[in-house]
Every structure is written in structure tokens, then in C-alpha cells.
Image (tube, grey):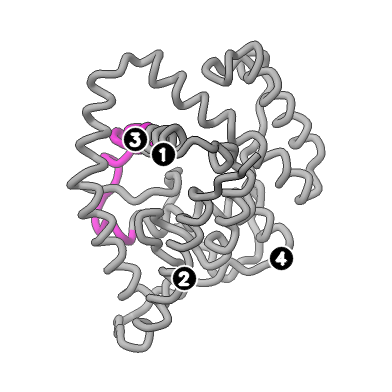
């Protein structure tokens, strides 16, 4: 079996490109009153503006069209399908973090939803009361004591940190779509996943107030720290209580 890893390579190359660009620009960008979490704010805002432009021109219009023409049950099924594929990553990272119970729950969810739930289209496990906390390699590194490092806005991928960015290649390796051999099928499913995720943010983004960049940055950092600590208040010197919003890894456009 020939394993295709185009998805992994594209994500890894984007992350490496971001770091390379940062190295070239960090010394040239001057930002007054830098936020302690965001020493590269000048560079990050430029990438944010680029992402916003792409979102306004392509992603948001497509997401609105998808929501308009796609029945709610179908949208739910699509979201369930991709979420089910992520259970493999959660199970593995739960084991790496010393959480066998969560690993068992995630494995059970994957097996139940992949069979009774018809390839994950129906989240039957949740109806049975079987739920698990999502885990990824960025969280695993945090549990292992790796510092989150500066905030980093990645081209196309959106909000991240140096630690979370370093976990992206491993996240891709454990996501089944990476190994789909047929390019058309892999690209098609990846595009559907992106559109479905973006459509899910159409309502949430109305909560954004003031400086969109600052809002998204602080919401992202707060959520990731909550996930790494499993909701416990830690000793992170960068922790902030200024925002209390629950957003996923995305930056939104007007």
C-alpha cells in the first residue's frame, strides 16, 4: 500500500514557512507595548490580515452557501464523520498523557460510531452517554512540561503557538485522511471538512467585539491553557482572565 502524506506535508510546510518568515521579519517589525504572549505581533497581524482576506473572498461565502443549501441533518452528519476520525488522535494522546480512561472512552466512541453510527455519520456513542475529552499533540507537549512559547498566527491555519505548531505534523500523522491514496477523494474530503468547520463559526463570530485580532488571540490562548490543564488553574505566568470565550482554532472574517 502506497501511503499518501500530502495533507501532512502541506501542513508541515506551512508551519515551517511561517517560522522562516518570522525569522526574517521579527527583527524588522516594531510594535509598541507588546503583549507578553505575543512578541511577534507585527508579523502575526500581517498574517492575520492575509488570512482574513482569504476568508472574506473564499471561505466565508462558500460556508454560507453550504449552510444555505445543506439540510441540518446532513451538516450534523458531516461534522460527526470528521469528529469521529479525530477519536484516534485523542485516544493516542490520552495514553501519552497518562489518561487511560479517556483513551478507552475515545476508542469506544470510535468503534461504536464507526459501526452502529454508520462510518461516524451518527454520533451514537454520545446518545449512549459515552463522551471523551479531545486531546492533541500540542496538549500532550504541554502536559509533558513544554512551554507554549510565543503566540503564532499561521498562514491559512490560523491561531497557534510555537508549541502547538510543533505538534501539527504528529496530529496529521494520526488523522486518517492523511492516508487516503486517491488524491481527488483526499482533497475533496479535506475541502468539505474546512467548509463544514467554517460554517460552524458563522454564528459564533458575531460575539467578537473590538479588535478582532486581539479578541481571537486572547480567546485562543485562554482555551488552550484550559485544555492543557484540564480546567485547573495553573502557574503559567502568561495566563489571563481577561477573556472567557470558547473558540476553536480559526480566525474569522467580516
Q: Tell me the distance, in whole angstroms, between the alpha carbons under discs 3 and 1.
A: 12 Å
Image position of 92 with respect to 166: above or below: above
Which of disc 4 and disc 1 is earlier in sequence? 4
Q: Does 91 sit left or right of 249 as displayed?
A: right
Residue at 34 percent of width and 82 percent of height: 25
Position in image of residue 94 (x %, y %): 73, 44
Q: Earlier in the sequence, mark 2 or mark 3?
A: 2
**Decide: marks 4, 3 in contact (CB < 8 A)?**
no
Element marked by disc 1:
helix
Residue range highlighted in magenta:
196-214
Question: What residue is disc 2 on?
Answer: 37
Say if the magenta span includes residue 207. Answer: yes
Label drawn at residue 187 = 1
Q: Secondary structure at mark 3?
A: helix
**Label disc, if present, on residue 145 of the rendered structure:** 4
Determine whether the residue tagged by mark 4 lies in a helix, strand or loop: loop
Q: Earlier in the sequence, mark 2 or mark 1?
A: 2
The residue beneath circle 3 is 195
Query: Does the segment drawn in magenta span residue 61?
Result: no
**In x, y percent, where is residue 211?**
25, 59
Comparing 5 with 32, the one in front is 5
Q: Nearer the viewer, mark 4 or mark 3?
A: 3
Camera-nearest residue between 10 and 90: 10
Horizontal side of residue 154 vs 142, given as left or right: left
Query: How far apart are the alpha carbons under marks 2 and 4?
Result: 17 Å
Amino acid at each position: 500500500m502506497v501511503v499518501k502524506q500530502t495533507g501532512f506535508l502541506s501542513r508541515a510546510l506551512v508551519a515551517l514557512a511561517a517560522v522562516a518568515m518570522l525569522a526574517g521579519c521579527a527583527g524588522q517589525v516594531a510594535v509598541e507595548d507588546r503583549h507578553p504572549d505575543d512578541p511577534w505581533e507585527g508579523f502575526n497581524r500581517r498574517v492575520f490580515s492575509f488570512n482574513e482576506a482569504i476568508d472574506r473572498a473564499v471561505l466565508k461565502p462558500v460556508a454560507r452557501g453550504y449552510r444555505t443549501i445543506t439540510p441540518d441533518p446532513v451538516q450534523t452528519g458531516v461534522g460527526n464523520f470528521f469528529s469521529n476520525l479525530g477519536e484516534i488522535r485523542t485516544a493516542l494522546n490520552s495514553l501519552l498523557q497518562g489518561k487511560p480512561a479517556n483513551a478507552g472512552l475515545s476508542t469506544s466512541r470510535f468503534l461504536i460510531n464507526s459501526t452502529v453510527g454508520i462510518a461516524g455519520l451518527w454520533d451514537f456513542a454520545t446518545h449512549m452517554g459515552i463522551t471523551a475529552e479531545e486531546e492533541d499533540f500540542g496538549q500532550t507537549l504541554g502536559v509533558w512540561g513544554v512551554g507554549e512559547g510565543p503566540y503564532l498566527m499561521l498562514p491559512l491555519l490560523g491561531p497557534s503557538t510555537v508549541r502547538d505548531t510543533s505538534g501539527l505534523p504528529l496530529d496529521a500523522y494520526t488523522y486518517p485522511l492523511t492516508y487516503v491514496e486517491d488524491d481527488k477523494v483526499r482533497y475533496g474530503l479535506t475541502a468539505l471538512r474546512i467548509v463544514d468547520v467554517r460554517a460552524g463559526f458563522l454564528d459564533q463570530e458575531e460575539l467578537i467585539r473590538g479588535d478582532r485580532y486581539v479578541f481571537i488571540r486572547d480567546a485562543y490562548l485562554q482555551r488552550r491553557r484550559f485544555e492543557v490543564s484540564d480546567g485547573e488553574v495553573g502557574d503559567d505566568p502568561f495566563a489571563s482572565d481577561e477573556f472567557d470565550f470558547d473558540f476553536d482554532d480559526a480566525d474569522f472574517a467580516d
